[in-house]
Amino acid sequence: MQNHNLKPAETAFRSGFSDINGLHMYYEIYGEGKPLVLIHGGGSTIESNFGKAIPLFAKNRQVIAVELQAHGRTSDRNAPLSFEQDADDVATLLRNLGISKADFFGFSNGGTTTLQIAIRHPEIVNRIVLGSALAKRNGVPDFFWGFMQQARLSNMPQQLQKAYLAVNPDSAGLRVMHDKDAARMLAFTDIPEEKLRAISCPALIIISDKDVITPEHALEMHRLISGSELAIIPGGHGEYIGEITTVTEDFNERTLIVPLIEKFLDKKPE
């Protein structure tokens, strides 16, 4: 374990690696209280995805942030990326850390992984927050799939490339991460509706009004997941949590939706 600070918020944390299903998996733990697991999106690191939100969440709870296969400081395995495997990896990490149950907040690809955690490992889940999560191929505009077919490392946002290299100066690893992320999206198949209907934990579905995910898809998930809540927030993909590609010079943490998420997570069981 090492002690570090997350700049610029100066929020202390401890970090480590855990050997999981053939991976050397990196994680960070902040704060104290009820566990909240943060699961990043494709091409991201902990800091690029959640660096703005973590200090706010950590005021009131224990935050466990992970880096998934081939991302950031976590190693790769000789296998394609899959949301199901990511879900199993996170579940194994929690067992290794001695955490029997937690809340989960996944963003973008991490939201799809969070769906798989709720489907495959319901016994470890209290509540889930699905930030810009995809459950069906028709949940994004048609042009998205053409864009993914043309995906090249040179087209990857510079902020994400720099964030990766800041924690792992392996340019070959950066390319592997990019190419495996793109291949996973091109191979993505719909999550069966019966599996979505079987999710029994409380769920909050969040998208932006200018998101990659369509409002129609968010509404469909809301209808399929019984008792779920739905929020559509002004802004772009990830702007509501300060994802690095959305942050501008006039960024203000008051625009983040951490209070909305905490209100949902703190609700008493009905």
Image: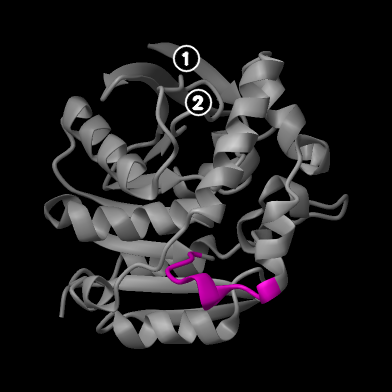
Q: Earlier in the sequence, mark 2 or mark 1?
A: 1
Identify which residue is drawn at 40% across, 68% down.
190
- Residue numbers of the magenta segment: 133-142
Using residue 145 as the reference point, say whether residue 121 is left or right of it. Answer: left
Instruction: Provide residue 255's location: percent of width, then percent of height.
Output: 68, 64
Question: Which image quadrant: the N terminus?
Answer: top left
Is-magenta flag for residue 117? no
Residue 97's place in the image compared with 219, above or below, is above
Q: Residues within 10 Å of mark 2 (few under 14, many from 20)?
A: some
Q: Which residue is mark 1?
A: 3
Query: In percent of the image, x 44 and y 43: which residue is there?
Result: 58
Residue type at tag 2: Ala
- 249 lies left or right of 129: right
Q: Quadrant of the C terminus?
A: bottom left
Q: Main secondary structure of the magenta part?
A: loop
**Kind of element beneath mark 1:** strand
Question: Residue under circle 2?
Answer: 12
